[in-house]
Image: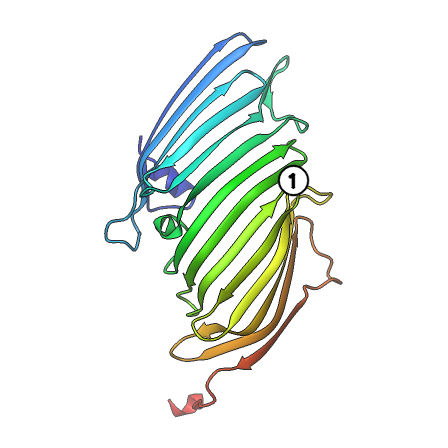
Amino acid sequence: MSIASGGRLVGYPNLQGNLNIAATLGGTLRAPQGHLALEARGISLASSKSAQPPTLGLGVDGNWNGRNLGLKGQVTGLKGDTISFAGSAPLLLTPSPLGISVPPQGQLSLQLQGSGQLEHLADLLPLGEDRVSGRFAADLAVGGTVVAPAANGRLRLSDVRYENFATGTVLTNMQAELVGDRDPLHVNVVSAADSAKGSLSAQGYVALRGAAGPTADLSAKLANFRVAARDEAVATASGTVSESLVRRPRPRSAPRSRSITPTSAFPKVCRPMSSY
């Protein structure tokens, strides 16, 4: 069946491709057995900027025993790049009353591995007119329980170039690494240059579990970094930007910590509106 109609429902009106699903269910209420096979082919976005937009495929195979759902799958059609995943998650069938639930203390075991070029995925990401290129390598896992997940592994981005269409901002030679052993995952190294002589560096962490749920904290330092580069204006900035993200609302008495000192501004030559 076509996935175009489903794409429109979730906010992707230009999504195209075909999806095949086969499922079987047997056994008894006390010992059920289920199997799922999913295959998606020719996934693409009709609004892609490329003359020949890339198409992806997805294959997923799963088995269910009434307590856990085991899955393994792979993304195909990535011009030699690889992305695969496997693992299991709790999915409990209760015979009386009849129902299916995800127990909070159920064990998680999920793995994601992959490597390749970011530009091969760019047309499938919500980037609009922005551009991105560079390499990625991922070897990540999530364990623990549903209520207290714990992540470990490594995600590395290298030699990344990003161009923002709206502001003209360009990040070049960006290096980033997210690494951890259980919670939290630390942003060990983030560095980038701009299209002139500016630089940006950042560090922080991402934690999946905590009293308030998932949290993240990031601090970035800018040095004569070109934050806007348009025909109308060029602006650079120096200073620090700190951001803490938690699921609970932030108290009004604790504003975000931000300090940016502009080092160049918009052109000083401006005509009053009455002269037009």
Q: Which amino acid does label 1 sit on?
A: Arg
Quarter of the image where one finds residue 250: bottom right
Q: Quadrant of the C terminus?
A: bottom left
Quarter of the image where one finds residue 259: bottom right
Helix, strand or loop at label 1? It is loop
Residue behind mark 1: 182
Q: Quadrant of the N terminus?
A: top left
Q: Judge by depth and name the residue closer to the eye, 259 or 222.
A: 222
Q: Can residue 242 be seen in this view?
A: yes
Q: With respect to residue 184, does 235 lie above or below? A: below
Q: Is residue 126 visible?
A: no
Q: With respect to residue 151, does 87 lie above or below? A: above
Residue pushed farthest right? Answer: 253
Q: Residue at x 53, y 23 (%)?
A: 69
- Residue 254 location (% of width, % of height): 74, 62
Q: Residue at x 44, y 41 (%)?
A: 114
- Residue 33 location (% of width, % of height): 50, 13
Residue pushed farthest left? Answer: 51
- Residue 141 location (% of width, % of height): 56, 36
Residue pushed farthest top? Answer: 28
Q: In this view, does 274 lie to the left or right of 66?
A: left
The colour scheme used to paint the residues is rainbow
Density class for disc 1 (Cα within 10 Å; few <14, some 14-19, many ≥20) is some
- Residue 13 location (% of width, % of height): 35, 46
Tag count: 1
Q: Judge by depth and name the residue closer to the eye, 238 or 94.
A: 238
Q: Residue at x 43, y 88 (%)?
A: 273
